[in-house]
Amino acid sequence: MLLTKSEKYIIMLTKLSKMVMILGLISVVVPCLNEQEAVPIFYDEICKIADKMSRQALFELIFVDDGSSDDTLNAVKSLNKKDDRIRYISFSKNFGKEAAIFVGLEKSRGDYVAIMDVDLQDPPDMLADMYYGVTQEGYDCVATKRATRKGEAKIRSFFARKFYAIINKISKTEIVDGARDYRLMTRQMVNAVLSVKEYNRFSKGIFSWVGFKTKWLEYENVERVAGKTSWSFWGLFLYALEGIIAFSTVPLSIASILGCVLCILAFIWICIIVVKTLIWGDPVEGYPSLICMITFLGGVQLFCTGILGQYLAKVYLETKKRPIYLVKEEG
């Protein structure tokens, strides 16, 4: 029996849809900030992986331009014109990587969603193992962490290790040392992450807080392929504070305990001075000691007030209910 062209076309579409259902779709979210040089290099590398995994999964790439001041958006647009798998979102200004990750997860359509840096510090060739972990081994997420910090500035490595040590001691949410945002998640876990609508976001903490069964893969530190990082030491320090404030109230407890201890010490010191004066007639210590004491107590008060102010500032921003991001252009 001969089939017409329309019937053949319908059969072909049916087979294709069945193939899509069998293979599944991986959405790759790629935050970008001033990465015009890295975008085409990343695209070439991810296409190689997509070709290797063509019998396992289909791919879509979601580039999120976080208010870049260079030609990052134009570089992504040129790729979008020649490849239907590419989508892009451009913010009205720089809202930060956390907002870029959030909108990428929100706009993704895949059964599985990966987050990758465009500078190729997240090796694309690990995607095959990550996909196997979530599809065959029963994991909800396969995440990555750096085995070493080789090639990173020593002072940055030192403070990074101390940050993970501190936050894991004062927080109930465990954050793995050396953890990267690079991970592949099931749709169920992505939906759970998206349900956390807070404005002040710390993704590493959120990924851990929502739970789900996670497998960790290690890899050696990789240098970026092009461009310069937008992260300064001060920016990373503030980001670390954001994580501590978001997932621990221990600093508030420290401020309270410190205040109580100082009150007790001050009372004891007053008693000692009164007793010495009444029994031995010793004169009260003079001006220098008084100034030192006032300066010390003033510093402690400002420190504790600063801790309280940080938490109040976050509450203030949350209650304003500003949007996490604003999209200028999408394609």
Image: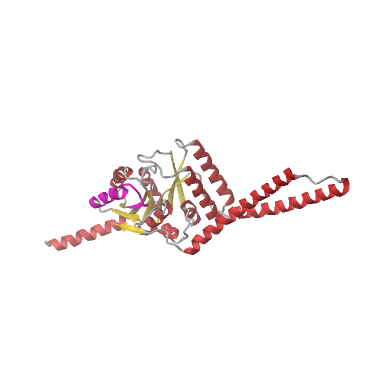
- Residue 81 in the magenta stretch? The answer is yes
Q: Quadrant of residue 310?
A: bottom right
Q: Residue at x 23, y 58 (%)?
A: 15
Quarter of the image where the N terminus is located: bottom left
Q: Which residues are magenta?
A: 62-82
Q: Nearer the viewer, residue 6 or 69?
A: 69
Residue 254 visible, this orientation: no
Query: Among all residues in the image, which is located at the extreme front?
Result: 287
Q: Nearer the viewer, residue 29 or 243?
A: 243
Tell me if residue 90 comes above or below residue 124 in the rendering: below
The image shows residue 215 at horizontal and vertical percentages of: 45, 49
Task: Classify residue 108 as left or right of residue 292.
Answer: left
Q: Quadrant of residue 14?
A: bottom left
Quarter of the image where the C terminus is located: bottom left
The image shows residue 132 at horizontal and vertical percentages of: 38, 49
Task: Report the colour scheme.
Answer: secondary structure
Q: Nearer the viewer, residue 101 or 125?
A: 101
The image shows residue 319 at horizontal and vertical percentages of: 50, 64
Residue 309 visible, this orientation: yes
The image shows residue 10 at horizontal and vertical percentages of: 19, 62
Number of residue marks: 0
